Image (cartoon, helix red, strand yellow):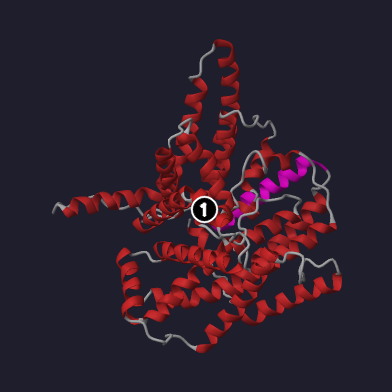
Amino acid sequence: MTFNSINFLFFLSVTFLLYWIAFSKTKSRQNLFISITGLVFYACWDWRFSGLIIATILSTYFGGLLIAKAKKQEAVFLKKKKSWWIFISVLLLNIGILFFFKYFNFFIQSFIDVFSLFGKKTDITLFKIMLPIGISFYTFTALSYLIDIYKDKTLPNNDFFAYVAYVSFFPALFCGPVGRSTEQLPQFFSKRVFSLSFITKSAQLMLWGFFMKLCVADRIAEYISAVTYNIPQHSGLSLLLAVVLYPFQLYCDFGGYSLIAIGVGTLFGINLQENFRRPYLSVSFSEYWKRNHISLTRWLMDYIYYPLIGYSDKLRYWNFCMIVTFLISGFWHGVGWTFILWGLYQGLFIVLSTNNAKRRKKFEKKRNLQNNILYKTAAIIITFVIISLGLMFFRINNINDVFLTVKTIFTNFSFHIDTALKPIAYISIGMIILLFKEIRDEFFPNNLRLLENPNMILRLSGYTFLIILIILIGVLDNYQFIYFKF
């Protein structure tokens, strides 16, 4: 049941009405309803995997209680072994489940490939393992709670259904944003009160999210799929256009999902974390990762990078830990060597960016470039080029095809695009509107407001305009969201 389907809109309408009419009297009823709808929503995808999310919920919830109890005992007896063993056991259980379903076959295949390099054959066969949807997201959301309790950043929660609602909140269940126990969980500890502003804010977020997904991401997807599935038959210009457009497909697909999820969360009185902040208007690679997939980046920094560096003050070790963190990010995103190379690429460039940040600021100050439009534009373009080149590893599954793409762009460039004019026209319309809004939000946030206009007539005109655009140029084929496979 994807967001861009009639079934979801029906499901959302029914749950929204039931939530505020029949279950809004107390916090407990609200949390019970959200817990049930979340698990039902997950089961609608494939009920056989419902046991996995339930296992994650039960293990982390009761694990958190046991850790807190063990810590009290340790404070008396001055020992720190029991809580550590509980923490590690629950952590390994959940990481183990994630590893098995997502990476087991990859490692087995890599093992077979290594032996084949030396001319040895193995009789090992791969399992037919289906990847449970959303497993990476809800696992990280639950582990945030477990780790925060162990690190004494939060107290254990005695409200079981508040915790179930936190992990299984259906708008964020499949593709995030990744929840944080210190930010999202406390919202389930108090009763939510309905406000008409929920509907207004939700309409703004969801309509723009649907536009990003249906009119930009899915339109670009049709072109890129045709190109990347038959790379040798396309000209350098066609491939270059695919390389430039893919970042926008990825951003509008996942960014659109995130906005819809945040909008749906708002309808139920829950504020989900912002996940994207105009990432392709970043002037440096380090700034890009402060704006892109914010919930995951913060999670990786707080739970992997900072614990890794510990109390070290050595820059080389910091750089090493940053590269390791982004290698894990690449591995989290997908199974395959291209994702590992993508993670390494990200790590190397963010190290270069952060290490040169002071030198760059000094250079900008000396030449008075802080507010120079041409300089800033050049910085945005250079950053985008670096991002686009890295994302080739993200989109093209075969490493040889990545190099073939680069080679063709430089050796077989011709002013010919191997596609019909109509799809390019639709893509152009979507891209112009997207870039207009991105630039306006970044540099002129108080001007030309339509969806957010305080005047109801202008606001409704904006909603109507987007709905018409979605109907006219949107792809209404229920295309799955890219991050469902992660």
At x 53% / y 83%, what residue is drawn? 424
Within the image, what quadrant is residue 44 found in?
bottom right
Closest to the observer: 433 or 176? 433
> Mostly what secondary structure, the magenta segment?
helix
At x 62% / y 77%, what residue is drawn? 432
Residue sitting at the far front: 366
Q: What residue sits right under mark 1 in the picture? A: 286
Tell me: residue 455, above or below residue 335.
Answer: below
Tell me: residue 176, above or below residue 444.
Answer: above
Residue sitting at the far left: 119
Closest to the observer: 239 or 22? 239
Residue 311 coordinates in the image, percent (x, y): 48, 30
Residue 6 seen in render:
no
Residue 288 coordinates in the image, percent (x, y): 54, 57
Tell me: residue 252, above or below residue 341.
Answer: below
In the picture provided, is 245 more to the left or to the right than 27? left
At x 43% / y 35%, what residue is drawn? 314
Residue 382 coordinates in the image, percent (x, y): 48, 65
Residue flagged by tag 1: what amino acid is it? Ser
Residue 334 coordinates in the image, percent (x, y): 43, 55
Q: Dot 1, how many residues are within 10 Å of its Cα: few (below 14), some (14-19), or many (20+)? A: many
Residue 172 seen in render:
yes
Within the image, what quadrant is residue 77 found in?
top right
Residue sitting at the far top: 77
Closest to the observer: 31 or 394? 394
Residue 37 drawn in magenta: yes
Residue 20 drawn in magenta: no
Q: In the image, which residues are magenta?
A: 26-47
Total labels drawn:
1
**Secondary structure under the numbered disc 1 in the rendered image:** helix
